[in-house]
Image (tube, helix red, strand yellow):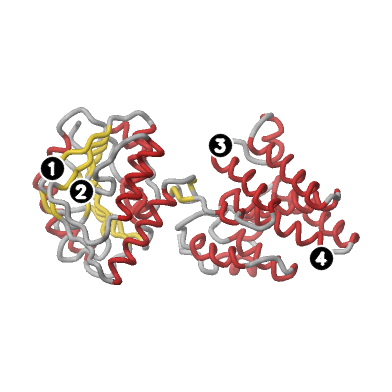
Amino acid sequence: MAEPAAILVAARDEAGRVGETVGALRAAFPESEVIVADDGSRDSTAAEAEAAGAAVLRLQRLGKGQALSAAERAAPPGALLLCDADLRGELRRLLDGASDVAIARFSTPRGGGFGIAKRTSRWLIRVLAGFDAREPLSGQRALSPRARTTVFPLAAGFGAETRMTIDAARAGLRVAELELELAHRTTGRDLAGFLHRGRQLRDIVLGSGPLALNHRGSRLPLVGWLVGLDRDPAVAVVAAIGLTDDVWSGPERGFRAHVRAGATTGVLKLAGIPLVGLLRTRSVSGALLVGLSANALNQLDTRPGRALKAYLLAALALGAPKGKAVLLLPYDLREVAMLGDSGANALGALLGLKSVSRLTDRGRWLAIGALAGLNLLGERRSLGLYIERTPVFRELDALGRRSA
């Protein structure tokens, strides 16, 4: 493998360790740029890395995968080397051979947990990609230019390594593990250690499922399908229809683009969701309310928390279920996960179904008229633009969301 154009290091609160790591990397790879993505450290990590000669990106707390993806965008073209901030040992052997992804396997395994996260990661990689990984969570990796293009942006948080291996193996790239004499700091079997491994396990599982790019280019897990775990089978079917669009959608956006393209997942939603409403409510007004509500909420899902806030406001008026939306809102706002079409469509369908039971016949048709107008407005111009230009809505919309 070629000499890396850059070495990427994600670091959070690694003062006292990151400087030595950067110094060793610069000595071993003098022609490579060392880029440290400081993931919201509260100590002197950034200053220590700079003093050791690294280029430092100062980020808000995003997560390991997002931090490495930000560093990759700042790196020059070419091969990459990924390294943990507390590593001790020599990585040059990762460049030997002709593999696209070379992963360091610690010759002396060290871990403070029970291996649940590692076993889960191994199983997911084997089932989803057919590759038997012995060290699935190792952050020490060399990537060829082709592998770099394939795996970036990385999955969020601690799901980065697992999904990186899955993506590379699925793409038919050559993946190899090499045993090296390395050491790093491990978490213990205390409360902090178990909380860390719990977050790691969560990110591994979510990062191995459907992912999508958000408005910042971060690759986040789609968790809106959880809304479909409902007692009402109509909501589950709508969530499944939305999930097809999340997973297999094309470049088409908007009603007219989907109709012109013909058989798309968007057309499936346009026809399928109102049909579900018709079968569930046995009324044309019910079909229209379910279809229009699902699409309107989906049009609002262009910024973190926006669709969920709109749903909760409407749910207060209609008496619709609020629990799942409240649970998902913090993750959506912090850009840890995304609602996706599956969640937005399912929540919109919930509102539509609740409207059928709560509104009079006249009220239903008034709501249908208002929703049709909202949908048409969203077809012509993004509803988010109108929200951002209205002071009250703009402030409510930005509440709880991380700054740009």
Q: Which residue is tagged 2? A: 34
Q: Is residue 8 left or right of residue 180?
A: right
Residue at x 81%, y 52% (from the top left corner): 281
Give whichever of discs 3 and 1 has the lower sequence position. Answer: 1
Q: Inspect the image, locate mark 2, and give the three-letter code of the amino acid beneath it.
A: Val
Q: Earlier in the sequence, mark 1 or mark 4?
A: 1
For mark 2, give the secondary structure. Answer: strand
- Structural distance between the alpha carbons of marks 3 and 4: 35 Å
Q: Secondary structure at mark 1?
A: loop
Amino acid type, mark 1: Phe
Using the numbered discs, state the Cα–Cα distance from disc 3 to disc 2 in whole angstroms.
Answer: 37 Å
Residue 356 found in image quarter:
bottom right
Mark 2 and mark 1 lie on one chain; the one further toward the N terminus is 1
In depth, the one of 28 and 244 nearer the eye is 244
User: Callout 4: few (<14), some (14-19), or many (20+) C-alpha neighbours within 10 Å?
Assistant: some
Q: Nearer the viewer, mark 3 or mark 1?
A: 3
Residue, disc 4? 358
Q: Whole-Å distance between the Cαs marked 3 and 1?
A: 41 Å
Provide the secondary structure element on which disc 4 rests. Answer: helix
**Looking at the image, which residue is at 46% across and 64% down?**
402
What is the crowding at mark 2: few (fewer than 14 residues within 10 Å), some, or many (at least 20)?
many
In whole angstroms, how far apart are the C-alphas of marks 4 and 2?
Answer: 60 Å
| Residue 103: image location, x then y, percent | 23, 41
**Which of the marked residues, 3 or 2, is nearer the chain's N terminus?**
2
Residue under the point 26% across and 32% down: 100
